[in-house]
Every structure is written in structure tokens, then in C-alpha cells.
Amino acid sequence: MVSLDKIRFYELTLQERSEYLRKQTELTEGEMDALTGLTGLTAASADKMVENAIGVYGLPIGIAQHFVVNGRKVWVPMVIEEPSVIAGASFMARLARAGGGFTASADKPCMIGQMQILDTKDPAKARQILIDHGSELLAEAAKIDPVLAELGGGPRELDVRLIEDSPIGPFLVLHIIIDVRDAMGANAVNTACERLAPRVEELTGGRVHLKILSNLADRRLARARCTIPVSELAFEEYSGEQVRDGIIEAWAFAAADPYRAATHNKGIMNGVDAVVMATGNDWRAVEAGAHAYAARSGKYTSLSTWARNTDGDLVGTLEMPMAVGIVGGATRVHPGAKAALKLLACKTAGELAEVIVSVGLAQNMAALRALATEGIQRGHMTLHARQVAAAAGAEGGMIDAVADRLVQEKNVRIDRAEAILKEMKR
Ligand code: MEV
């Protein structure tokens, strides 16, 4: 076993990494097995999760290193098929650590439920009636989930909007804001909307059509911030100032142009989704919220910002909706997700949201740093070459040998990998 001092996690074998992680954390052997996929979600459990199940589908899980969020060291499990993401996040977390790590915060875990109210005779009057009966409706909603109320959550606010212009004419939208505590909250919110609908119909004389949560969870934002000392940014022939300014210029492109912003935000979501998936959360919900929030001004733009501070250091921020839970749904059913949550040791859904946005910010910086300097292909090349070598039929030690040749030749193509493999086998 490799000495545990000054360990380079990425240089360990698969087994050594598991052993190391187990020694460093409170995960039991069983939990480690679930996390690494040795055991984990069974086909029988899958059969209870989705319809027509035929089995389970695997993806790589890795651990991002060096994350310090609000002064706490965090092991970050990431589920992702794309090379360079985990390495990029780890590397940037190391640079951020030199500036004190990530400072993150999360709003109260409030989700929005929507009710679409059609066929009112006078929508403006119906709106006023709902506003006047706000306390009554909130009190009725509070009775629906006593467990949530005991935990300190429950309905908080109502908001009624008149949509004046739509393809079917004007209608009302009632928002109910519910503090869902440590859950993602879809069930609590959808139940409340369905249960309140008859009373809303009675009060307005209208028809409540859709009753569903909004994924634009802008009452549940999470933010991360990091400061990278400019000296930490220097590498090879690039000075720290050059890298810093290159990152700021790259960000400005995304801030100004939706075509670039989509790709820029995709880079953020590489980090975000990987942790959302590892913890069994609904990444489509988080994706939907992220992009809707990025377009909140009417123009789609960057979710992050990058600037220099008065000391000349690089400062990054990220703010986005983060509807994730640590209880309920797959977070409890999937043994790997349960183990991932234990590894993260977040006591609340808000803490998990804080880690996730920090990873998103780190990932964004990794992409911008590469794009602003050596280009994205170089970092991608080694791992990509290994994937190509494996796809060409290389096994065991052959994978690295073929990959090394592909990288040397700067020609990462499957036909070339097949040719090299054939030559080596001969
Ligand atoms: C690739 O998965 C993500 C990037 O395209 C992000 C970006 O361009 O900022 C590298």
C-alpha cells in the first residue's frame, strides 16, 4: 500500500484509491462497495424505481480532490462519462484553496408550486380574491404535511400573477412558495398544489388546470465565490496576469453572447450535474433551473462572473438555482447515492447546494483557463486517447501503451489506435 502521506490520489490504483478513501472517511466497507459500484443499485431495486425496468446502467464515479467549502474539506463524488472534468475540478479547487477555498451560501430551501387558473369571468377580480384569502389558503396548505411543519418547513407565501397575453388569452397563475427543508421538494409542492386546487376554484369561480412545481427555483439560489491569488495562475510560459486576464476575457465573451454562454454554462453544468447525479438528485430539474435562470433578464447569459480584485487576484462567482435534497427519492433508495451523501457529510440540503455550486465554479474556471491558454484538446487528449485505445480493443497495460502513442503522434483516432494495437500484438 502506498504511504498515506503526501499521496497523489490520481496515481493510485483503483483499489488503492478505495482503501485510501475508506481510511480517510467514515465510510464502512459496505458503503465503499456501494459507492464504487461493487454492490449498489440492483435490478430488483431498479424495478421498483421505474417502469419496464430491465436492469441498471453504469457510469464512472470519481472523487474530486482539494475542495474546501466554507472552511470545510470536502471529498466530492462526481458521476460523469467525460474525461478531464474531475481532474479539472480538482486542479482548480487546489488553486482556490490557496486563496482560502470557496465561500458559499444557499437561500432557504423554498420551492415554487404553480396553479394555472382558467375561465375566471374577471381575472383581475379573481386575483384580488385570492390575495384577500391568502392567509386562509396558506393555513389550509400547512395542514397537508404535518411532518414538514414539524421539521420547520411548510408553506410560506402566495403570489398571484395575471398573464395578460397568451395564445389562449388572459389567465391567472397562483404561486405557492413552500419551504421543503432537506428534500428536493417536488412531492410536497405538487401535493400542496393539487390539494389546494378545489378551494382556489371555489374562490375564483375558475378552473385550476395545471398544478405543478416550477423548475425555475429562483427562491432557492446557491452562490459560490473564490479568489485565486494571481501568482497561482502562472504555468509554463503563461504569467499569472496573462491567465487571469485571459479568463476574464473568456468570461466577457459568455456574458455578451448567448452562443458562447450556452457552452460556458455547459462547462459549469459538467461539475454541477456530476455531483447532482452522484447524490441521486434530479439533474434535469437542476439543468432546467440553471438555463431558465441564465435567461432571466430576457437575454441568455453566463451564470458566473470573473473579475480582478484590487490586489490583482482573480475572483469568480457563481449564482444559480439549486433544487437538491439529502432526503427522499433516489437519495435514499440508491445505495451509491446514500454513500456519496455520507462522504460529502452535508448536514442540510443547503450545505449540499453550497458544495455543488463550488464545484460548478471550479469546473468553469478549469474550462476557461484551458481555453484561454493551451486550448481544450491538450488536457482532454490523454484520457480521450485511453478511451479510444479501449474502444479499439486494447486491454490492461495495452490501453496506456496505445494511448501514449496516440498522444505522442497527436492523432487520437480509432483507426490509428487499431493499427498501433495490431503492430504491438505482432
Ligand atoms: C466541454 O464539456 C465544456 C467546455 O466546452 C466548456 C467551455 O467551453 O467553457 C470546455
Image (cartoon, rainbow, N blue to C red):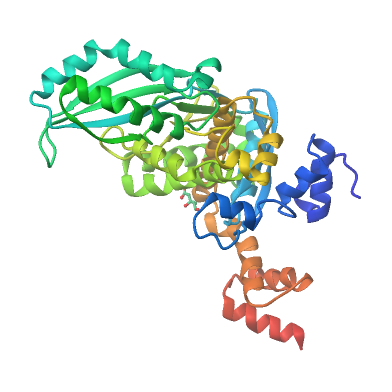
> What's the residue at 15%, 24% (across, down)?
205
Relative depth, front residue between 231 and 275:
275
Q: Quadrant of residue 54?
A: bottom right
Question: Residue 413 placed where, x, y %?
Answer: 57, 74
Q: Is residue 75 left or right of residue 363?
A: right
Residue nearest the observer in this picture, 136 or 212: 136
Residue 129: in sight, yes or no? Answer: yes
Residue pictured at 57% horizontal, 56% vertical: 82
- Can residue 241 be seen here? The reply is no
Image height of 63 relative to 162, above or below: below
* Quadrant showing the C terminus: bottom right
Residue at the spot 48% in from the left edge and 37% down from the top edge: 245
Q: How many marks?
A: 0
Q: Quadrant of residue 257?
A: top left
Q: Is residue 300 left or right of residue 304?
A: left
Q: Residue furthest bottom?
A: 426
Q: Please name whichever residue, 53 or 426, is drawn nearer the observer in this view of the structure.
A: 53
285 or 389, nearer to the observer: 285
Q: Position of residue 271 (x, y in %)?
A: 55, 43
x, y percent for residue 7: 82, 43
Residue appearing at x 25%, y 12% in the figure: 133
Instruction: Residue 353 in the image: state x and y as whole percent.
Output: 54, 31
Judged from this view, the residue extending furthest toward the left is 121
Left or right, residue 311 beside residue 138:
right
Q: In the rendered view, would you say 92 is above or below 136? A: below
